[in-house]
Each structure stands twice: as C-alpha cells, then as structure tokens.
Amino acid sequence: MAMNTPVRRPGGGLWRALRGSRKATAGAVILLLFAVMAAFPGLFTSVRDANALDFAPRLGPSTRHLLGTTALGQDIWSQLVYGTRQSLVIALVAGFLATVLSVLVGVSAAYLGGLLDDLLSMLINVVLVIPAFPLIIILAKYAGRGSLTVMLTVLVVTGWSYGANQMRAQALSLRNRDFLEAARVRGERRSYVIVAEVLPTMTSLIVANFMGAALYSVLSAAGLQFLGLGDPNSASWGTMLYWAQNQQALQTGSPLWSLAPGLCVALLGASFALINHAFDEIGNPALRPVRRRGAAPAAAAPPVDSAASDAQSEDSPLLRVSGLRVAYQGARGPVEAVAGVDLTVRRGQFTAVVGESGCGKSTLLFAIAGLLSAPAAVTAGSVLFRGDNLVTMTEKQLNALRWRDYSVVMQSAMNALNPVRTIGAQYRDAMRAHGTFTAEQVRARSVEVLELVGIDPVHLRSYPHQLSGGMRQRAMIAMALLFTPDLVIMDEPTSALDVVAQRSLMVQIKELQQLLGFAVLFVTHDMSLVRHFSDQLLVMYAGQVVEAGPTRTVFDTPAHPYSRGLLEAFPSVRGPRVELRGITGSPPDLARPPHGCRFAPRCPVVEERCREWEPELYPVGEVRARCLLQAPDRRTRPLPPVEATS
Amino acid sequence: MTAETAGAAGTAGTTAATGTHGPADTAARPALLETVGLTRHFRVGGGLSRRTLHAVDDVSLVIHDREIVALVGESGSGKSTLARLLAQVYRPTGGEIRYQGRSLATLRGRRAQLAYRSDVPMVFQDPFSSLNPAYRVSHGILRGLALHRPGLGRAERRAEAERVVEAVGLAPAAEILDRYPHELSGGQRQRIGFAQALAYRPRLILADEPVSMLDVSIRIGLLNVMTQLREREGVSILYITHDIASARYVADRLLVMYGGHVVESGPTEAVLTAPRHPYTQLLLSAVPDPRAPLEVDAAAARSDPPAVIDPAPGCRFRARCPLAVDACHALTPRLRELGPAHAAACHVAEADAPSPRASAAPA
C-alpha cells in the first residue's frame, strides 16, 4: 500500500491557518507596529523627554508637531510614542501572568477534581461575579497609587478568572479521554500528565486566552490611569488621557490630546481581539465562516433523470436510485463519496448495504433520505420514491413525506432523541408535525407502537436516559413506525449494542417488517448481521456498488474478491478454528481514487489490467459484480481510455 | 516472590480456573497474575439516594504465563472495571490482586509501581481517543521507554520504537512513527496502542475491547497481531470483549462475566461446546454466524442490563434466565467446578452436571 501522503504537523497547520486568517494578519501587523514603537521610540520622534514642558502650549498639528502640543506645552506625538512602551508592557505582562494563573487554577481544578475542584471553582466563580472595575479602583487606592507593580498585580488578580473557567471546562472535557488514562497507566506522574499531555492539546485556547487577558489589561490600565490611579508622571496613554481630562483638552481646543491616546488604546485592544478571535476560530472550527469554494452544484437543481416523469405503475419499485453521485467539498477539492449508485427496493423488501467505514454507505443513505447538509451535495442522479424524485423536492415537500411515508432510524438513538423530553412527548411532536390528532389518538397510537416493539407503555413517561441502549433503539424504531411508513431507512441501528441486544433487535425488526409490510434499507459494516434478515445485499467499496444480488447467493458464492474478503473476516463460534486473514490495507482516499479498479491495491487476485481498466457491474448469474474477472468479454473488449485524475 | 507461594495461594484462594484437576500444562504452570475475591463498588447518587453500584463482585481469576484469556460479557458486566483494577487505575474495594505471587497492596514506592506498570500495560478501546492528538505517534512509545527502560539511550529508544511498530505489523516503521494520530486509520492507531504496550517488554497486556470500534474487516488483522505477540514476544493477554466469536479465535481460556460476577470459566473449546451457564448459552446463540442457520429465541434474548445497584442476594441473571428456580432468588451461586478446569456459577447447572469428584479421579 502506497503511503505517500505528506506528513502534516499541527504546528505547521496552525501556522498556515493563522497566515490564511485575515483577522490574525491584521492584528499581528498592528501589534508589530506598536512593538517597534515601544522598542525604538527614537526612530519615531526626535524629542528625548516627552514629558518636558519644552514647547508652546496648545499648538495645532504641524510638520514639527504632528499632533500639536498639549496645554502644558508637550509634543503629543512623542508622548504617544513614549507611552506605547508602558501600555504594551502592561498588556503583555499582565496578560501573561493572568493566563498562567488561569491555566494553573483551571487545569488543576479540572484534573485533580474532588474537593479541590469544588474549592477552586467556587473561587473562580466568586472572582467572576465581583464587578472588576470598582474592585480595581478600591485595590489601587489602598495599595497606593503610582507603582507599576501594584497596577500589574491588580490587573492579574481581577483578570484571570474568566480564562480559568474556560480552561477548566476544556480540561474537564479532556479528562476522560483515553490518552490521558493511557499516560496514567503508563505510570506518568500527575504533574507530567498535566504539563505534557493536557496542556499541548489546549494550545489554541491558551493563546486565545492570553490575547483576551492582554486586551482586558490594556483597557483596564488605561481606565485606571485615566482616573488618576496610575503614576501621573509616567509616560503612558492612560496618563495622557488623565492629563488631557485634567486640563479640559476637549473644551479648550486640543481634541487630539484626548483622541490620539484613546485611539491607540482602541487599536492595541483591537489587535489583541483580532488575534484572539483568529485563534478561537482555529481551535473551534464551528466558528469558522463557511466558505463554499469552487462551483458546488446547487442541491436544488441537479440533473433530473428522465425516468422521473414515468408514471408509477402497480409493479414499479418503491424506491429506485439511479446514477446517484454525492460530493463533499474537501480541503483538497471535491471528494466523491458516492460515485454513481443504482439501487432498487421493492415494496416489503429488506435491502442491506454493507461496507467498511468511509465506503460511502451512510452518505448514500443520507442522500436518499434527503438529509444531506453542506458541504455535501447530490451532484447527479435521481432518487425516485413511489415515482417522485426526492432529489428535486423542496425541503417543505420532503418534510411532508418524511416520517409519514418513509422514516429514518439513526445509529445512535441517544443522539437522535431529545434528552430533556419524555418519549411520549417526542412521539406527540412527531405525530402533530404531520397532521391534526387528538390527545387520545396520539396516546393510543404511541401505546400501540411501543407494544409493537415490546416496551411497556409506562415508558412513554420515561426520558431517554432512563432506558437501556437496546430499549432506546426500540423506542426509536417505534417512533419510526408511528405512521406505518412504506420504507424505513436504518443506519447501523445496532452497532452501539451488545451482541445479545443486537441479535434480539434484528429479530424484532424482521418480525415487524413481516407484520407491517414496510420495506427496509439497512446499512451496516457487519455483513454477518444481515445474513438471515435481508432479501438483497449491496456491497459498497470506495463509493461504488461492487456487488449486488440476493443475500443468500452473495453469501454462498461471493463474486467479488472484496465480498469474499468481508465474509472471511469473521471468526466463527462453531466448526474448526482456522486462521483468517481479513482484508489487508485500508480503503483508498476518495479525493484521489486509484486508477482502474478501486479495490486493486488491496485485492488478493489482482491482475495488471485491473489497475488500468475501470470495471463495470457485470452480471454473474443472479448477482452483479464490479470485477474484471467477471467480465463476460474480458479478453476481447478494447481498452477504455484511462482518464487522468489529478 | 516465588512460584511456590503463588501455587499455594492459587489452590487455597480460588476454585475458578486454577486447573487443579485440569490439563497438565495449565496445572503445572504458576500463576502470573491472580485475583482473589476482587471487588469494586462505586457510590452513585448523593445525599439520601446514595446507593452502591457493584461493578465487580468477588472475582477470582488466574492468568498464566504465555496465555491468552478472554473476558467476555456485555456492557455493564464489569469487565472494563476489572481491567482498570488490574491496571491500577482503580483501587479495589475488597479482595486482592497478586502479581507473580505478590500482593499489589504491598507494592511500595514509585519504582515498584513502575515495575508493575511496565509488566502489565493496557490497550484501550477507542483508537480515536487513546493517542494524544498534539504529539506524533512516537510520543507514547518513547515516553514509555524512557520511563520503563531508563537504561536505553536516545538512539536505542528510537530503534526499539521502530522494532515494536514493526512487530505489530506496521511499515515503514520510521515513517509511521513520525505521523500524527489523525493521519492513521483506526486499525493503524490500535496497532500503535499495542506497540506502546509492547515497548515495555510486558508480561501481560490488558486489552480492553481493542477491536470493538474497528470495522469488521480489519478486526481479524488485530486479533492476529495478538496471537503473534504471544508466540513471538511471549506475553500473556487478557482480552476483554463482548464478541464471543473473536474470543474463541484468540483465547485459550474464557471467563464469562455477568453483573459483576464471573459466571463461567474454562478452556475455550470446553465452554463453547458445552456451555454450562444459561447466560453463556444465550451469548452463544446471539453470535451472528453467517455459516450457521438462524436459531434464536427472541423472548430469551430480550435484554435488560443486570441490576447491580444495591443488588439483592441471589443469581443476578435470574430475571432473564429460562431455568431459574427458587434457590436462584435466595442464594448467590458460586463458581463450582463442573468439568476439567471448567466451572460455572449456576444452581441449576450444578444439579445436572457430573460430580466434580468423579472427574477429578484420573488426575
């Protein structure tokens, strides 16, 4: 198996993400400018002592005095330049110390837990609700005014709690991750686990926090100095604001004395806020604005299959999927997760779709159910349900059909059910969404479906978490049967269950299906599960159907090497113990599917031409298989041209 | 401690699968790891509704050198708690764990602790969360080597890391080690989990459902890795699973857990061909086997998890058991030997089983 994917480093990824973010770039440019100004004030002004009263008061802007002079006769521009250093130092030092404190308190509270966590969280929450600014004023007043150390202390003491809360939340969510337990089982000390295992996974949050704390410090320091709680002789923007207010700069015709330092505070604050937000977006992809690159085909108007106009006759299939293609917009261009699937489900038929993770089986199911969401979209093909094309329907039309005529059971009932509403309430919602029913009708039907799946109707008053995993899936299936739909679509409904619960659920689904006559489209990675339950079987690999036919036939005489591999992957509880090999390697990257047969890199019976020819689904008795070995005219057929895929 | 102590403790402390009447190879071997009446309870709820969850109750088991033992049970049976007790993530509420004859409670000091941890590492269930995403794959292996084999230099650690990665069937090792977890598939990550454990030169690997989150098609590859590790590296493995078919594929002996108790134990084929406990029979009938005709009694398979919060005395399987008699409601059955090295905790199975004395005679 070729493993030539370039090695990606999170560090490199972070850097690239930052460079790509306009917010981060803008913030960094402003910050850099101020940093240069703070480090080399001499480059920006020829005045050596900005506080000296060397000039005439209240001069307007000129080439000598870029921003004019103060009422006391100082050059405003050079005061601004010299003030940068203190503002920046306060921001960085206070920001850094506050962040250290947040990390220390937040992470140890979360990680060590117990009584310590209770105490520390209480402390965090108390500091959080104390109105910070009045406290700062009082603290600064008592600590004596003027000293930079006092100012920093005050800012750190009041500025750490918000961050600490975030750190604690993040560390709590990490706490039960297996890699931390693995480190403990390895024998690492607690301190090592916190410093070397927990913290590196929190980098972007910590940086974002530092920027937030710095922003807070800049604003608070300026505020304190403005109120006269700083050293009145220091060179800083806040002190400038203090003197400008003192001398009534706005009223006496030198507005730049107030405006310029105010603007600088705002700019520096903005640079921290911009970088902070950029890091937030990187750490939390949910905040990232969705950018649709390229010409993503509109889901509303894909090409319509001509069959769509066919009138539905009595023996036409319940569901006919033709040439269905679904693509995701990936980071490296479109990824075709479903690459031209045809499938037909007749009334009352149990159809199983099997394949490994990433073969596109769940995407296929979502596309059929009309549940795809961006960045995935149907790019071609049609889904005819009772003759109507679901692909071209509006959301409103789909909603009318969904649940009433076809319903969907998801992999995890715990996620699909609302945890804060009772089972009964959720059934009521589902029914009322599709018609007007009296409370009595709703209740009668709810009791009926629960009894169908073998759950005591008292559980209508239960919340999902009060039911066991198997019961939740049953309750979910009962919900799918509220309207006796024609088709129930199931996405690995048993994969979260134990063997025993799994087996009994399968038996039950089959019984219900025979009783009520609905068709089932069932997706699973476990081929052995559907052996006794499904009428037809589709084996999917890398977005394509590689074998389709009656379940019995596929199991008895698999025609595709992949199906054979799947079948040979199961140890048996009976018969002789034989060594099994399964299927070596892993499925291909769908962004760059292999040339020719997609299974060729893993195929035990691969031939040279398999890497060049793209096989079609060839009929083999009752089944169809996408394997050149099954091609009827394999020797005589001309070579199809190989399209270069980049 | 020496083998004599371990052997004596084994016969005195357990009736489970010490093999006093069993095949000679098991009987002769001293226990590598052994638990006696191991118990772990958790408090659930608070204030007035405080109750006790009996996750693991009175479990006695033995694992020998170079032996793969499968611990089979459904979720809530206590099998993962048992693994975490053995890995010293949890402290036992009662009973003890003996490693090479020595009780873990007597381990004092960090050095002794580390020595045990390096001998008995653990592989976790979820390959997507068991590797730290901030580090390259090599991180865990190299850290483990630095901790447990401090004699190795930097280059030697790297070479050893490559060796163990190759030993679990990943190639090219050097390149794999420099990748980040998100660049590996689930199966590859789980192999890294085994490579980490292997780096310590372990005696016993605790594998907690190592394949249950992987695709069926790649599970078999990992199971093969486990058997190869036993053959080539000479380790023992405690394989925890709910899939009895995969347990049969790799294990020499089976322990079946239900509701915190070991309800049946014995050589794999003996348990599977003649399961004594009704729960084992149910488990077996539920295994999807495409090669066999369908035979399942849906009513018996109706599953409710065992009540392990403040359990009343009696058999914990009785509510689901088709054979329950009065005694099952009053008396908690204990493991009793019913065949060569084959024991079950069931009042009913006891009644129609051959006498343990009779089968012991030719030993």
Image (cartoon, rainbow, N blue to C red):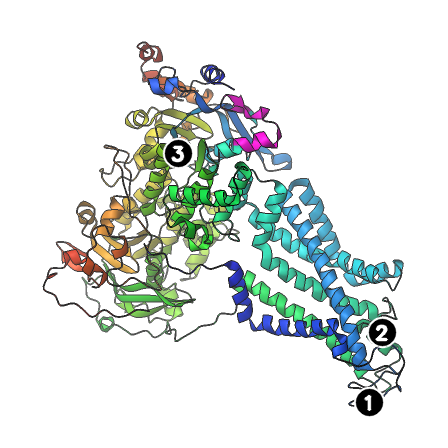
Crowding at dot 1, Cα within 10 Å, few <14 / some 14-19 / many 20+, comes out as some
The alpha-carbon separation of the residues under discs 2 and 3 comes to 75 Å
Numbered disc total: 3
Give residue B115's position: percent from left, percent from top: 54, 31
Dot 3 corresponds to which residue?
B233
* Residue A468 visible to an observer of this rendering: no
The boundaries of the magenta stretch are B95-116
* Residue that badge 1 annotates: A60
How many residues crowd mark 3 within 10 Å: few (<14), some (14–19), many (20+)? some
- Amino acid under disc 1: Gly
Q: Nearer the viewer, residue A460 or A196?
A: A196
Q: Residue at x 34, y 16 (%)?
A: B351
Circles 2 and 1 in contact, beta carbons < 8 Å: no
Q: Chain of mark 2?
A: A
Residues marked 1 and 3, same chain:
no
Residue B103 among those drawn in magenta: yes
Q: CA distance from mark 2 to mark 1?
A: 20 Å
In the picture, the quarter occupied by the C terminus of chain A is bottom left
Tag 3: residue type? Glu
In-front residue for pair B5/A490 = B5
